[in-house]
Image (tube, rainbow, N blue to C red):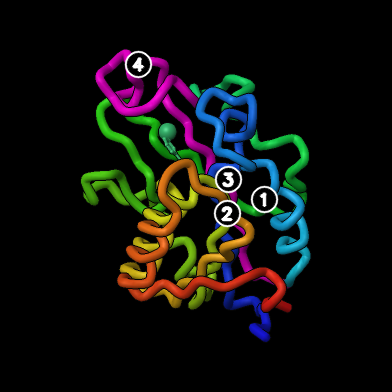
Amino acid sequence: MIIITAHDALLIVDVQNDFLPGGALAVPEGDEVIPVINQLTRLPFGVIVATQDWHPSDHISFEKQGGPWPRHCVAGTQGADLAALLDAEPVGVILRKGRSSEIDSYSAFSDNNGIAATGLAGLLAGAGVTRVFVAGLALDICVAATAIDAKKSGFDTLVVIDACRAVGDAEDAETAMRTAGVRLVTSDGLA
Ligand code: VGL
Ligand code: ZN
């Protein structure tokens, strides 16, 4: 068993309407992470952060701008809202990322150039966090990028795999995370 203490943080990545079935960039079974995450948030984490993908309407990642993704998570739209069934009450910090038109930010720690830090690493360290648990959507994009950056930022990093779903290749993402020193665990191993 892994015992959660105040030195642990939970990062809930992009559990937003546009990533749920029926959404603009639907992650298959994305809604299935919600009850698992709602159980995780009952554990005594020192900090719980929820991220939101939060794009301007001309964002570089959109197909119309030559990017890889359909228009999604436009700032202030219903698609960008946190999933209604996610229990947001225990969430202490909301972090909105991908807000520049010019550069995407898969990771909650910095932009995709690895240049502009979001301030999350300092926020966590300042709160006495030494270990970070990551859950949410999508496993192979924003969860993987966030977990790998958490590890690079010096945190012991674990991804709660049953609290994530992938939009593409989960196995490649799992390999990349393991190679980076991220541990993969299941929610039934946490208390
Ligand atoms: C994401 C693709 C584009 C994610 C965000 O949250 O995983 N994926 N923007
Ligand atoms: Zn996005």
Indicate the secondary structure of the residue bearing disc 1. Answer: helix
Contact (Cβ within 8 Å) of mark 1 with mark 2: yes
Q: Nearer the viewer, residue 100 or 20?
A: 20
Image coordinates for residue 38, horizontal then vertical, percent: 75, 55
Q: Height in image: 104 above or below 187?
A: above
Q: Nearer the viewer, mark 4 or mark 1?
A: 1
In three-dimensional space, the C-alpha distance between marks 4 and 3, rounded to whole angstroms, equals 23 Å
How dense is the environment of label 1, judged by Cα within 10 Å: few (below 14), some, or many (20 and up)? Answer: many
| For marks 2 and 4 on the same chain, the one whose residue lies earlier in the sequence | 4
Q: Is residue 33 above or below residue 105?
A: below
Task: Kindly identify which residue carries mark 3.
Answer: 94
| Residue at x 43%, y 47% (from the top left corner) | 142
Residue under circle 4?
Answer: 58
First in sequence: mark 3 vs mark 2: 3
Q: Are marks 1 and 3 in contact (CB under 8 Å)?
A: no
Residues rendered magenta in the picture: 44-72
Q: Nearer the viewer, residue 184 or 103?
A: 184
